[in-house]
Image (cartoon, rainbow, N blue to C red):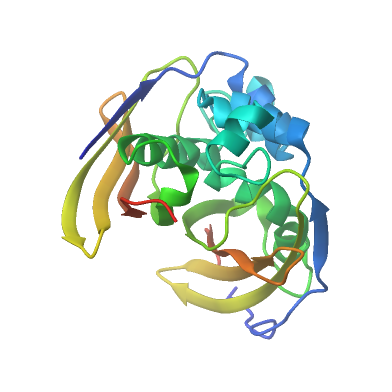
Amino acid sequence: MPVRDDAKGKTYPPFEYEVGKEKIREYAQAVGEDNPIYFDRERATEAGFRDVPAPPMFAVVYSAGSVAPAVLDPEVGINVAMMVHGSQEFVWGDVVCAGDTITTETSVKDISERGGMGFYVFESVSRNQDGREVVRGTWTNIVRGTS
Amino acid sequence: MRVELKVTPDKYLPHRYAGASGDFNPIHIDPEFAKQVGLPGNILHGLYTMAQVARANVNAAGGDPRALRRLAVQFRGMGLPEQEITVTGAVREERDGRVVVDTEAEQGGKRIIRNAEAELTLETR
């Protein structure tokens, strides 16, 4: 079955996420961070941050609520059981700290087929409460057995 | 600047990462389900392994998260809990206080993240 690409260019409503200090702690612990700036407000402000900063890859936490509905959209038509995460890129802007409100918008950047596999590329753009871009993510999912 | 980090995710790490990230896909947390779909057991989240690559590169640049400007990775194969992961990287080019690092993550002789590229600033903003 060839891949359908009608959803190419589709955009999804913005998703808002409020960044909490304890969520940063939970994430930082899970990925093995030991830098005290992620856990201790005083150490963070001494290092020049507004509040405890998020590790760069915390981007997955605040953007997931925007990206997941796009990946699961029936109009995009991904067979999730056959999907693997092929590649990922993040380009960071302003640092994210506890207390920030991050708004993410996702779009279907490309859908193509190569060698019997479907390539689904999503782009997420996340901005903080001042409208400043904090991260741009490019998520490439590969679906086997499309032809 | 040299990038090197070794980490051995414990048996329950995928569960903690699932809670922290919100990704509860059963292939990461349910060994029986994972085996039913042809995997050797529950596997690591690719984005957890990518976070190890990010951490290794930030640490090599001095530990400030603002240093990491860009990270692009390709996922290959699968990472497993209870096996050591080694992240390495070497500077490919350096220009105007910014470096581009070729980096990867290896586990049990397999490169589970390859062709990865990190861009870092060496002075913080």
Q: In screen coordinates, is B77 left or right of B41?
A: left
Q: Is residue B34 visible?
A: no
Residue B82 pos. (x, y %): 47, 14
| Residue lying furthest front | A46
Q: Is residue A101 visible?
A: yes
Please tell me how many numbered marks the rendered image carries.
0
**Residue under the point 31% across and 47% down:** B114
Residue A16 pos. (x, y %): 82, 60
Residue A53 falls in image quadrant: top right
Quadrant location, the N terminus of chain B:
top left
Residue B10 pos. (x, y %): 53, 14
**Residue under the point 70% across and 28% down:** A26
Which of A52/A66 is in front? A52
**Residue under the point 31% across and 36% down:** B60
Residue A140 pos. (x, y %): 52, 63
Residue A108 falls in image quadrant: bottom right
Which of A97/A143 is in front? A97
Residue B56 falls in image quadrant: top left
Quadrant location, the C terminus of chain B:
bottom left
Q: In screen coordinates, is A18 left or right of A42?
A: right
